[in-house]
């Protein structure tokens, strides 16, 4: 449980609408995303690679859930066969980051978005989180 509690308001843009994730605000460095409505797999300051998998898409999403359940300070808010929303809460101040996963089964990838609800910079926390989750996801397949 955090020492303080600054969760912020849950964004209304969550949910993987239209097969895309919400874009990162251009003026903030506290967000990364693999694919959103205004881009198509292009590199940029907010870009991060999607999670790649082989085999059954349902098994891949189950693996994401298993990784999240093992992650400290993580709470799964919603999940369906093609989408997962989780919240990560910082240990001391109780800031909340929203992490989303959106299945693109035809491409054998799971798109990801991780964003702080508040502030402008996160000192690379969301990018590092995505890479840590990717590593755990890949290791869970071994």
Image (cartoon, rainbow, N blue to C red):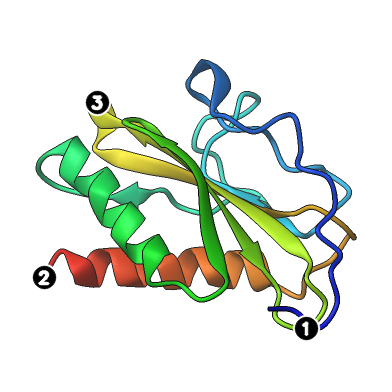
The reply to whether dot 3 and dot 1 touch (C-beta < 8 Å) is no
Residue at 22%, 72% in the rendered image: 139
Direction from residue 71 to residue 108 in the image, left or right:
left
* Mark 1 burial class by Cα count in 10 Å: few <14, some 14-19, many 20+: few
Q: Dividing the image into 4 quarters, which one contains the N terminus?
A: bottom right
Q: Quadrant of residue 129?
A: bottom right
> Is residue 101 or residue 76 the one in the foreground?
76
- Determine the secondary structure under disc 3: helix
Q: Position of residue 2 (x, y in %)?
A: 74, 79
Direction from residue 16 to residue 68 in the image, left or right:
left
User: Which residue corresponds to mark 1?
Assistant: 92
Cα distance in 3D space between marks 3 and 2: 23 Å
Q: Quadrant of residue 133?
A: bottom left
Q: Dividing the image into 4 quarters, which one contains the C terminus?
A: bottom left
Residue at 84%, 69% in the rendered image: 5
Cα distance in 3D space between marks 2 and 1: 34 Å
User: Which residue corresponds to mark 3?
Assistant: 106
Q: Position of residue 15 (x, y in %)?
A: 57, 29
């Amino acid at each position: 449980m955090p020492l303080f509690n600054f969760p912020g308001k849950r964004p209304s843009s969550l949910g993987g609408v239209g097969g895309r994730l919400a874009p990162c605000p251009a003026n903030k460095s506290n967000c990364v995303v693999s694919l959103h409505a205004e881009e198509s797999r292009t590199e940029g300051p907010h870009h991060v690679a999607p999670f790649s998998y082989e085999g059954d898409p349902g098994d891949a999403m189950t693996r994401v859930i298993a990784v999240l359940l093992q992650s400290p300070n993580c709470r799964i808010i919603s999940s369906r066969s093609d989408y997962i929303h989780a919240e990560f809460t910082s240990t001391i101040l109780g800031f909340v980051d929203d992490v989303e996963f959106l299945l693109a089964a035809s491409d054998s990838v799971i798109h990801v978005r991780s964003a702080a609800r508040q502030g402008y910079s996160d000192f690379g926390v969301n990018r590092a989180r995505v890479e840590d989750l990717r590593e755990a996801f890949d290791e869970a397949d071994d």
